[in-house]
Amino acid sequence: MRISVSSDMDEPVARSLVAALRERGHEVRPHGALRPDGDPQWAVCSEAAAREVADGTADQAVVCCWTGTGASIAANKVPGVRAALCTDAYTADGARRWNDANVLALSLRLTSEPLLTEILDAWFAGAPSTDAEDRQNVDRLRLLDHGKARM
């Protein structure tokens, strides 16, 4: 799987994330502080990773900043992206299952290496729900992306 990864800081957990993804056999596409010429601003690098998901050059993305909040907000501004800030494995599983999330947002401050492993295990084991109500909600998000959803 091609996975875009962004971080606004070159922190140990960000480096561990890249290594863990590669160990799992994924092709990593780094952004921000994870590449020598990258713009480390969280809004810029998170958008860059999210755009690769939206345009199909990446299958998924993981975006990181100190709290994870800014990275998730920036990623979610890109139409077609459903970024979820996950601080535990249960949330990561639910984000994949119920929300069909295609971008994982992580906090560099809160995510330890053991927790990172748990979150990644849950994220990659999760699959989008086929439940009609769950699919309707995700379809609604697609309408919102195009400004077509109205009450």
Image (tube, grey):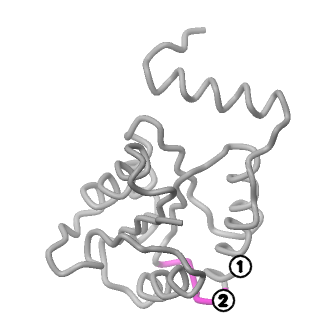
Q: Is residue 62 above or below residue 135?
A: below
Q: Residue furthest right?
A: 131
Mark 1 in CB contact with mark 2 (< 8 angstroms): yes
Q: Residue at x 42, y 91 (%)?
A: 12
- Where does the C terminus fall, quadrant-wise? top right
Frontmost residue, 21 versus 7: 21
Disc assigned to residue 118: 1
The secondary structure that dominates the magenta segment is: loop
CA distance separating discs 1 and 2: 7 Å
Q: Amino acid at mark 2?
A: Pro
Determine which residue is flagged by label 2: 114
Image position, residue 52 (x, y; %): 36, 52
Q: Residue at x 18, y 67 (%)?
A: 39
Image position, residue 87 (x, y; %): 63, 68
Give the SS element for disc 2: helix
How crowded pointer 1 is (Cα within 10 Å; few <14, some 14-19, many 20+) is rated as: some
Magenta extent: 109-114
Give the SS element for disc 1: helix
Image position, residue 117 (x, y; %): 66, 83
Q: Amino acid at mark 1?
A: Glu
